[in-house]
Image: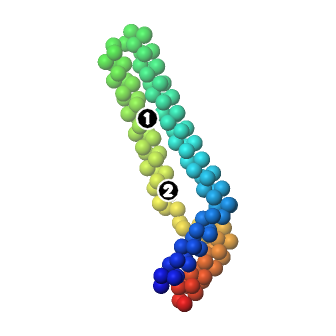
Amino acid sequence: MLEKLFGLASLGSTFASVSLLHRFLSKLIVIFALTIISSIAAGILLIALFYAFYCLLNYYGLDPYASLAIVSFLLLAVTVMLACVTAEKIKNLRQFPPSTMRQNFPSFNHVEKIVVAFFDGFLSH
């Protein structure tokens, strides 16, 4: 049993060392990092926009507390809108049927069958 686990571990390390998989994972990490950086930059820009709007309201003679109330209401509305869009996207993601991936990419189904047959045979000996 221990030999089979070592064999599986070495098989996993062989798959992990494949340059194609390594390039794919590195590109995926770069995309993820750029998404986070872009989100932070968009948040900073949005905060600056709200602050400029607050200063503009004060400049044209509105009371600072009224300006704060207006900007706070707008900020709350934007936050609620983004939360609703995020919740809707998560709900759509949960409703994504797993069989869709296999139908769109039939080669994955074939590869999955080969891998399952390999592991069934490997674990039965």
Q: Is residue 76 visible?
A: yes
Query: Which residue appears at 50% of the width and 36% of the height?
Result: 40
User: Residue 15 appears in which quarter of the rendering?
Assistant: bottom right
SS category of the residue bearing label 1? helix
Q: Where does residue 81 sit, x and y in percent of width and height? A: 44, 40
Other-residue count near label 1 (Cα within 10 Å), few / some / many at <14 / 14–19 / ≥20: few
Task: Left or right? Give the position of 56 relative to 106.
Answer: left
- Which residue is drawn at the image coordinates 49% and 61% (left, top)? 95
Q: Which residue is mark 2?
A: 92
Please state the horizontal and vertical placement of residue 26, each as a whole percent of the image: 61, 53
Query: For the residue marked with disc 1, what is the amino acid?
Result: Val
Q: Does 117 sit left or right of 88 as displayed? A: right
**Residue under the point 52% across and 62% down:** 96
Residue position marked by numbered label 1 in the rendering: 78
Going by the picture, which residue comes out furthest to the bottom? 125
Q: Quadrant of residue 17?
A: bottom right
Badge 2 marks a residue whose secondary structure is helix
Residue at x 46%, y 53% (from the top left corner): 90
Tell me if residue 48 comes above or below residue 2 in the rendering.
above
Q: Which quadrant would the C terminus be assigned to in this image?
A: bottom right
**1 and 75: which is toward the camera:** 1
Asked if residue 113 shows in the view, the reply is: no
With 59 as the anchor, is 107 left or right in this view?
right
Give the percent coordinates (x, y) of residue 87: 43, 50
Q: First in sequence: mark 2 or mark 1?
A: 1
Along the viewing direction, whichever of 37 and 103 lies nearer the viewer: 37
Marks 2/1: CA distance? Answer: 21 Å
| Tally of numbered tags | 2
